[in-house]
Image (cartoon, helix red, strand yellow):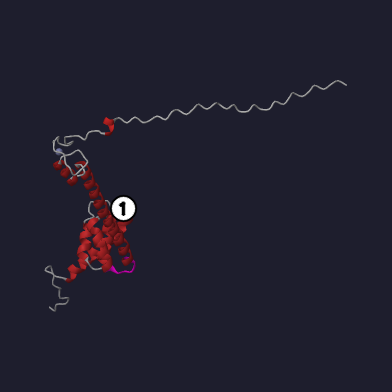
């Protein structure tokens, strides 16, 4: 039997080498020079150059410039920007208020039409018609005016449609209003004299 070769000797891992610590650096005193701590206060106003500095503030300004800063602490462009932003807020609030009122009137008017409360519908559509003269608002207003016997307003509304683009779905409804007005006018003509007095239907010869 031959001798088995010995396994390689187990070498313990080398202990981590500790780097010898360098001795702490000697504490360095912060060098504060006398003239840096005693930075001289400016002797003249930073705004206007006046030699008389105010004693009421640490700021290097004279008394009149200090008062000006207290009174007008913001530069003019900041004030103008603030005024502009305020104006925009007011305008947008007014616009959204108007939109809200319009939406309210629209919903209310539709409800009044559904309930056949024509006078109420006419009032709501009348408010909308003052600001919106689009074809749809005009026709809806004219219909409610017919329903509540405001024929003059209905006639004015449909005649305001002249020359305007009217979407196809409104053609028939606008025509109904115009035809009703025509019929009423003919009836009126038949029953009234030209000066608006009722004709006597039967006059014996
Ligand atoms: Zn000054």
Mark 1 residue's CB less than 8 Å from ligand 1: no
User: How many marks do you count on the picture?
Assistant: 1
Q: Does the magenta stretch include residue 14?
A: no
- Residue in the image at 16% along x and 77% along y: 202
Q: Is residue 164 visible?
A: no
35 is higher (above) or lower (below) than 124: above
Quadrant the C terminus occupies? bottom left
Residue 142 coordinates in the image, percent (x, y): 25, 61
Q: Quadrant of residue 11?
A: top right
In the foreground, 189 or 181: 181
Q: Can residue 188 be seen in this view?
A: yes
166 is higher (above) or lower (below) than 68: below
Residue with the most extreme bottom position = 204
Q: Does the magenta stretch include residue 115?
A: yes
Residue 182 coordinates in the image, percent (x, y): 23, 63
In the foreground, 145 or 176: 145
Residue with the most extreme right position = 1
Query: Mark 1 falls on what kind of element?
Result: loop
Query: Which residue is denoted by mark 1 in the rendering?
Result: 167
- Residue in the image at 18% along x and 39% along y: 61
In the foreground, 138 or 97: 97
Quadrant the N terminus occupies? top right
Quadrant of the image where one finds ligand 1: top left
Residue 2 coordinates in the image, percent (x, y): 86, 20
* The residue stretch that appears in magenta: 113-118
Residue with the most extreme left position = 195
Residue 168 coordinates in the image, percent (x, y): 32, 53
Please tell me how crowded label 1 is: few (under 14), some (14-19), or many (20+) other residues with Cα within 10 Å: few
Q: In which quarter of the image is residue 36?
A: top left
In the foreground, 149 or 15: 15
């Amino acid at each position: 039997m031959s001798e088995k070769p010995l396994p390689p000797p187990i070498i313990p891992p080398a202990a981590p080498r500790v780097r010898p610590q360098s001795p702490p650096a000697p504490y360095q005193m912060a060098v504060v020079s006398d003239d840096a701590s005693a930075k001289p206060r400016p002797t003249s106003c930073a705004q206007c150059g006046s030699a008389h500095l105010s004693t009421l503030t640490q700021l290097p300004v004279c008394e009149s410039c200090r008062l000006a800063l207290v009174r007008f602490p913001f530069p003019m462009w900041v004030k103008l920007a603030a005024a502009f932003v305020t104006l925009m807020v007011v305008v947008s609030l007014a616009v959204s208020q108007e939109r809200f009122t319009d939406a309210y009137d629209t919903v209310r008017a539709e409800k009044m039409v559904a309930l056949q409360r024509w006078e109420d519908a006419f009032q709501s559509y009348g408010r909308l018609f003052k600001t919106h003269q689009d074809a749809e608002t005009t026709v809806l207003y004219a219909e409610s005016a017919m329903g509540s016997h405001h024929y003059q307003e209905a006639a004015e509304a449909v005649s305001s449609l002249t020359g305007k683009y009217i979407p196809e779905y409104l053609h028939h409804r606008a025509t109904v209003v115009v035809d009703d007005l025509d019929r009423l006018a003919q009836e009126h003509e038949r029953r009234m004299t030209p000066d608006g007095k009722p004709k006597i239907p039967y006059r014996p010869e």
